[in-house]
Amino acid sequence: MKRSILSFVAALWAMALVLGCGPTTQGEEVAPEHQDLLLAKAESLTPQSGQGGSLKTAFNDAADKVRLMLLLSPT
Amino acid sequence: MLDDVLNQVDSEELSVFAVWMPCLPKTDNAEAALSAASLLPDSRVVHYWDDEKSVGTLYGKSLFPPPGKTFAWDLYLVYAPGVEWHTQPPMPTEWWMSATGARALDGEKLRESVLDLLPESAAVELALSD
């Protein structure tokens, strides 16, 4: 009985993910030393096209405009 | 939906940064991100592949402060002119996410939040062209 309930909940969870209504957050607390690495990585992301500056530079270069940043999963 | 929003906000006063991240480990990779990027052919969109989910982790921490909620995706962050990135990725002026709740993404809300921040002249031009 317990196993079938768990299976049902797991199926619902999988369905929610497929339908795009799953959680938008997950993970563990970020250690302070890892935080610096993440910041460096985020700042230095370069466009997939290979053209243009890093994410941080491009963001600040467009500071006179409205900007929309999308954080997306490709699938 | 996002494509519709971009089509409706036909202003060069808008820049878009699409950060693709591996949220689903088995299927998300740089190649899939390139393929997904083709679904947003708008010239104002610049695409990035964040293989370490750094941006999502940093925003997960700042937008969802309770411990354990440190990685975020399916986020739509809107920034007013003048907002700059200094040491940390800046907090958005407005934001939405693909989930249920008060900040559930709605194309109309996203479009309005962008239009509200555009310079008055650009917004008037868009209104006249409707």
Image (cartoon, rainbow, N blue to C red):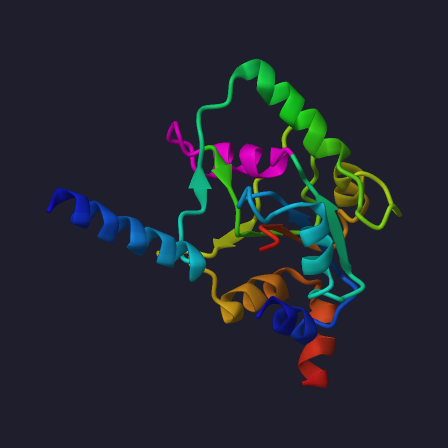
Residue at the image point whose x is 84% and y is 50% from the top: A49
| Residue B7 locus on image (x, y percent) | 69, 74
- The answer to whether residue B75 is above or below residue B124 is above
Does residue A35 appear left or right of residue A60 in this picture?
left
Please name whichever residue, A44 or B78, is drawn nearer the observer in this view of the structure. Answer: A44
Please state the total of marks drawn on the protein image: 0
Quarter assignment of residue B64:
top left
Residue at the image point whose x is 58% and y is 49% from the top: B27
Quarter assignment of residue B54:
top right
Asked whether residue A18 is in view, the answer is yes
- The answer to whether residue B19 is above or below residue B106 is above
Please name whichever residue, A16 or B85, is drawn nearer the observer in this view of the structure. Answer: A16
* Quadrant in the picture for the C terminus of chain A: bottom right
Task: List the single residue furthest toward the right.
Answer: A51
Does residue B26 appear left or right of residue A6 in this picture?
right
Residue at the image point whose x is 63% and y is 33% from the top: B52
Task: List the single residue furthest toward the top.
Answer: A33
Span colored in magenta = B52-69
- The answer to whether residue A40 is above or below residue B98 is above
| Residue B60 locus on image (x, y percent) | 50, 37
Please name whichever residue, A7 or B10, is drawn nearer the observer in this view of the structure. Answer: A7
Task: List the single residue furthest toward the left.
Answer: A1
| Residue A46 locus on image (x, y percent) | 80, 40
Check residue B57 for magenta coloring: yes
Asked whether residue B79 is in view, the answer is no
Residue at the image point whose x is 62% and y is 44% from the top: B21
Does residue A12 appear left or right of residue B38 in this picture?
left
